Amino acid sequence: MDISLKLLEIAGMIALLLWGLHMVQTGIQRAYGPELRKLLSAALGNRFKAFLAGIGVTSALQSSTATGLMATSFTSEGLISLVTALAIMLGANVGTTLIVQVLSFDITQIAPIFVLIGVLMFRRGHITRTRDLGRVAIGLGLMLLSLHLVHGAILPYANAPELRAVLGAITVAPVLNVLLAAVLAWLAHSSVATVLIIMSFATAGIVPLEACLALVLGANLGTAINPWLEGGNNNDPASKRLPLGNLLGRMIGAVIGLAVLEPATAYITLLVPDPAQAVAAFHLIFNLAMAFLFLPILPPYARLLCRWLPTRNDGSDPAKPVYLDADVRSSPPMAIAVAAREALRMSDTLQQMLAGVEDALQNGDRKRAAQTRQMDDILDHLNTAIKEYLTSLDVRKFDERDHRRMREILTFATNLEQAGDVIERDLVNLTNKRIKRGLTFSPDGQRELLDMLERLGNNLRSASAVFMNEDPRMARKLAKEKEAFRDLEERTISAHFERLQAGRQDSTETSTLHLDIVRDLKRINAHLVAAAAYPVLKDQGELLTSRLKLPKHG
């Protein structure tokens, strides 16, 4: 076979390996993603507990990159400390070695069994999680099959003079091996896949064991590049602390590994005669040694990273939580109080969005409409951060009031985020459509819409007050606004149709836009009432006739 076709065939087999690994990762993420994120965020300040959490999550995901991106987001949002996040990454690097240990044994015969079980679970499973675990089984089967195919494809060429000449030029330079494997791991987004390929080379005898171990060092270095490039916010140097710390640790480890490469090769050869298992053992030993080296010095190492990459204090990122302090999570009252304060920032943002809609309606400013749309991202990020912060708390320390207040905060944040979605998806689109078509509302119609917006702003301020003081009298008053707003909607629509029938002011061209905006304003008001009034009244044991219409019996 032509050499180019053979290389293309091997590339396809490696692609099958990467796809199998991708199926394992996505299947686990879909089946247990929230639980894994909660496990990481619950690591708190214990670096040894965080180390074990990193091992557990990455053993499931088989991607230290995915774990690194999650840990980076938690650190930037203030959910975990930098020391904890660095410990998680040390555990993540150990976690990626475990599946390599399993696949270092010749178990390719069970690959079809994995695929069969996976297909049955995926096709026959009526539960979403069962189907996701079916994807995992199929992925494992494809990984085993691809490794078998790669080994079979390269074995006939083990003694080819041309290949020996090329490899001879490469393997005499361990530093070149490290750089080559680092690039491959970076491109593949996976040290697991890279190490598995190196194992195939070692088994076939194509690459000497010492060179294979140098390639393993490079694979460990390359997998730290992606979190550095993809994690954190490029506008905030502090968000890059974790990926930089992980990358520097990998670089230090690679240098130390190169220094002891020759005796390490002799020692591992003596302990583990099988080349593939020797590569897997070195991969595990290297990452355990890195954890042993760095775990004791993480606090000063974290302080050094903070000095190199200081926090920006210019307030340029309004989507970043301000009050979610990881250090107070051991005290439920304090943790719940700071989460409530963070939720009020969502109220401030929603107030600005309503002002942006009002400005766009009055002045036809498309730039202001675009800015209002972008502000919904702030609500999304804050809502996610608040939920992750609260769900990471130890509920065993909660009393009944703590449980109730946490439910109120989650309800408040969720409804404000949904109100923001109505503005972003619907109201901004409607205002843009009016501006784009050059349409204008009648003076009466414009005034009606602006009056409704003003009332919404007042209700939002009332909702924030009810949320903070939990006053049932204010909650009842706010709850009545739902029915009052419904009456206002009906009067507005009736007045609009009267103007249309009389041929005064309003045009049929703007009629649909007008009615859609009125409908969306009522939806936003319903979210405001649900955000603050109903939780308080529910806790007071009150039933609202505006929420529950009972049929009359004779």
Image (tube, rainbow, N blue to C red):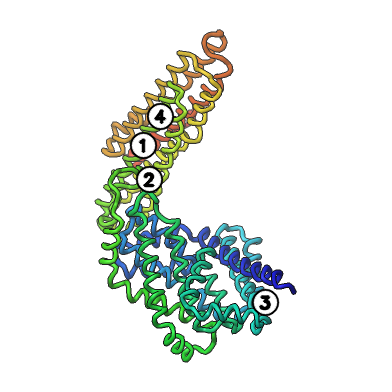
Residue 100 image point, x, y percent? 51, 75
The answer to whether residue 389 shows anywhere in this view is no
Which amino acid is tagged 2? Answer: Leu
Q: Residue furthest right?
A: 1
Decide which of tag 1 and tag 2 comes sooner along the chain: 1
- Residue at 66% over, 67% down: 12
Decide which of tag 3 and tag 1 comes sooner along the chain: 3
Q: Residue furthest bottom?
A: 270
Cα–Cα gap, marks 4 and 3:
63 Å
User: In front here: 85 or 237?
Assistant: 237
Which amino acid is tagged 4? Answer: Gly
**Residue designated by label 4:** 356
* Tag of residue 153: 3
- Residue at 34% over, 59% down: 241
Which amino acid is tagged 3? Answer: Ala
User: In front here: 138 or 63?
Assistant: 63
Circle 2 packing at 10 Å, graded few (<14), some (14-19), many (20+), is many
Q: Tell me where residue 301 sits by quadrant.
A: bottom left
Which amino acid is tagged 1? Answer: Thr
Marks 1 & 2, CB-CB < 8 Å contact = yes
User: In front here: 453 or 87?
Assistant: 87
Compared with 142, 268 (above or below) is below
Q: Is residue 299 left or right of residue 182?
A: left
**Residue designated by label 2:** 382
Decide which of tag 4 and tag 3 comes sooner along the chain: 3
* Tag of residue 349: 1
Q: Is residue 57 left or right of residue 436?
A: left
Residue 450 image point, x, y percent? 41, 21
- Residue at 27% over, 63% down: 304
